[in-house]
Image (cartoon, helix red, strand yellow):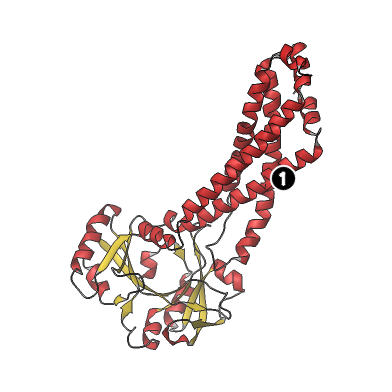
Amino acid sequence: MRFRSLIFANLFRKKLRLILTVGSFAIALVLFTFLGVVKSAFNRGIEIAGADRLVVVDRVGLMQLMPVSYGDKIRAIPGVKCVTHDHWFGGVYQDEKNFFPQFVIDVENHRQVYPEFIVPDDQWNNFVKDRQGAIAGASLAKRFGWKIGDRIPIKTTLYGGAKWEFNLDGIYHTEKPDGDQGQFWLQWKYFDETVPSVIKSTAGWYILKLNSPDDAVRVAKAIDEKFANSSDETKTETESAFAAGFAKQFGNIEFLIMTIGGVVFFTLLLVTGNTMAISVRERTSELAVLKAIGVTDRSVLFLVLAESLLIAFVGGVLGLLLAWGAIPAIGAALTGLLPPLLLSKTMLALGLVFALFIGAASGLLPGISAMRMRVVNALRRV
């Protein structure tokens, strides 16, 4: 603490340089947290995937439909607890920019396979009785200001482009606060009655719940062998593998984020390191005098590192505060184009650790240089 006044005096010696360096940290932290949040958003489906669930799709591709009769055959395989099927509806609400995932679900088995989606029993029962009923996630309902009883028109981009209307019978929540609450569900039976004949009695994909996660490999192999050489061969994989494959359709997001993050890291390291090196060079005579009056080499190293860490801390906190305010606004603007962007406390903590690490790394070499500096040589250059 005895060096506190000296540290602050050195920091504010060049106010413009201090402001620019702190600003560099702040901008870098905003970018760091945004990249981390985007990566987390794309990986959220993988992280929350059930270890005891498998997904069955047509071997040709996800958009290739399968007979709905496959459900009973899959259910008969030992190790399978229950099976449900989904369809992609592919519609828009009011405007093409209002995109959100809409799934045609099998109401008889959906809750057994997905217990983490919580719907009050009275709302679910009303949904089951109402062929034109629908259930929306809590965040989706909040986004559009929907409430139970609303009539919601959805214009499908598939199945002839007609406008369908649904009664909002329920709103679901998830067990975890970061769960997917942006889906819109409608009934398969109503869907099957209305679509063209070529789509009738089909399923987009099957989701099955296992008696034990240990049965995953055996059951997946049994399903694919059962439908081998048929007109609709299958590909069965764990839910996490399916979610990872779906995320890769957007490109190699993780590689892109790591590349940009690496550029941010090294750029900030060079900028801050150069700032501290210049600062130490400008104070060569002062550091030499401090050493001459008895200040130890370790204390000199501490002075330089303390300045660098303080800059990193202030810039990091400022950047995280900016990210705290900006990321929800960005997420709201990009709703439908990206998964929900959630800035967690863990991400904020990682951001601050990132800033402090950069501060320590950028101040280390100039600090060691100042620590090793000989008094006689330093004073000779003055």
x, y percent for residue 219: 23, 60
Rendering coords of residue 34 (x, y %)? 59, 53
Q: Quadrant of residue 201?
A: bottom left
Going 58% across and 79% down the picture, which residue do you hit? 95
Which residue appears at 80% of the width and 40% of the height? 16
How many numbered circles are shown? 1
Percent x, y of residue 175: 48, 58
Task: Find the residue positioned furthest to the front.
Answer: 381
Residue 316 located left or right of residue 167? right
Q: The disc labelled 1 sits on which kind of residue?
A: Gly
Q: Where is residue 265 in the image (x, y as percent from the top left)?
A: 58, 42
Q: Is residue 19 left or right of residue 162?
A: right
- Quadrant assignment, res 45: bottom left
Answer yes or no: is residue 349 visible. Answer: no
Q: Is residue 105 left or right of residue 135?
A: left
- Quadrant of the image containing the C terminus: top right
Q: What element carries label 1?
A: helix
Residue labelled with disc 1? 23
Bin the neighbour count of mark 1 within 10 Å (Cα to Cα): few under 14, some 14-19, many 20 and up: some
Up the image or down, 369 lies above or below 348; here it is above
Residue located at (27% from left, 56% from top): 216
Task: From this view, report whether residue 378 is shown above or below residue 24.
Answer: above
